[in-house]
Amino acid sequence: MVDSRCSAKPRIAAIQMNSSDSKAHNLDTVSRLVEEAVNLHRATLVLLPENFSLFDGTAALELGQQQATELGDVRRAISSLAAKLRVWIVAGSIPCSVRPDGSTIEERVRSACWVYNSEGKEVSRYDKIHLFDVDVGDSYGAYRESSQFEPGTSAEVVDTPVGVLGLSICYDLRFPELYALLTKKGAQLITVPAAFTHKTGQAHWEVLLRARAIENQCYVIASNQTGLHSKGRETWGHSMIIDPWGKIIAVAEEGEGVISADIDLEEITKLRAAMPVASHRRI
C-alpha cells in the first residue's frame, strides 16, 4: 500500500462508532479505530463522529463542565492520541461549559468540535449552530438539544495538510447557507460529524451530503454514529466521503469501522473553473 502521507494526494479517514454511556469504553474504541485509520489506511486527517466520547444526553452538562479547559480528560485523550500517531484529528463534538471567549455558560453547554494538529495542539474550535429540536416519530420520540445546549454563533474554517476544512456538526447539514458561507471563507473540504437518527438518516442522509458537496464543489467527509444506543436511540451509520462532483468515493454500512479516500485539491480547482457557480450566485 502506498503511504499517502508521503504522496501528492493526502488521505482522509472517517470513523464510524456505536458510542455508549461508558466514556472509558468509547475512548478505547476511538484509540483503536484512529490507530487503524493511521496504520492501515495511512490517513493524514481523521474525523470522529458527534458524541464520540459519551452517548448520553443527560450527562452533557457534567461532561461539559469537565471539558472546560484543555485539562479535561476527553480533550487530553484526543490531544495525546494525535501527538502519538502524528495525525490530525477532527474531534466530532465534545460538550463544553465555556465559550470560545472564555465566558462560562450558565446551566447549559455548547457542542464543540475541536481540531487537533499532528502535535496534539488544539488549532480550531467550532460550536454547533443549529440545534436538533425535532419530533422524529421514532422510538425515542422528541429531541430537544436546546434544553441542554447553547447554540454557537460563528462559522469556522481551518487550514490543514489536506486543505482548508469547513467545520459543521450533524443538524447543521440541513442549512445550506452555512455551507455556502464556509465555502466563501475558503473551504475545500467540509466535515460533518453526526449522530443522525436511523429514521431521518435512511430518508435524507445521503441526499443532504451529496447536495452540500455538489452545491459547494467541495469534498464532504461525514462520520456518523451507528446502531442502537442507550434510552432507545438508534442511529443510521453509513458514514461517507463524497467528492466535489457529488460522487460517493467511500461509504460504510452499519457497524463500527473506518473508511478513507484520497483528496485531490486540483479536482476542486478544475471543477470550480469549468463551472464557476460561486461567481454566478445572485442571492
Image (cartoon, helix red, strand yellow):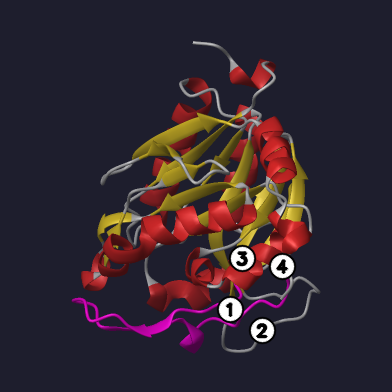
- Picture residue at 42% right of the left edge, 45% below the top: 240
Asked if the residue under mark 1 is in contact with the one under mark 4, i.e. CB atoms within 8 Å, the reply is no
Q: Which residue is at a point 43% across and 74% down the rendered structure image? A: 59
Q: CA distance from mark 2 to mark 4?
A: 19 Å
Q: Mark 4 packing: few (<14 Cα in 10 Å), some, or many (20+)? A: some
**Magenta segment:** 127-156
Spatial CA distance of label 3 from label 4 is 12 Å
**Residue 239 versus residue 149: which sits nearer the camera?**
239
Q: CA distance from mark 3 to mark 1?
A: 9 Å
Residue type, numbered disc 4: Ala
Tag on residue 105?
2
Q: Nearer the viewer, mark 3 or mark 4?
A: 4
Looking at the image, tell me whether mark 2 or mark 4 is earlier in sequence order.
2
* Residue bearing mark 3: 112
Q: Which residue in the structure is indicated by mark 1?
A: 109
Image quadrant holding the C terminus, namely bottom right
Mark positioned earlier in the residue sequence (3 or 4): 3
Q: On screen, 190 above or below 3?
A: below
Q: Position of residue 126 (x, y in %)?
A: 67, 64
Label 2 amino acid?
Answer: Ile
Tag of residue 155: 4
| Residue 113 lies in quadrant | bottom right
Q: Position of residue 42 (x, y in %)?
A: 54, 22
Res 120 → quadrant: top right
Whether residue 196 is visible here, answered yes or no, is no
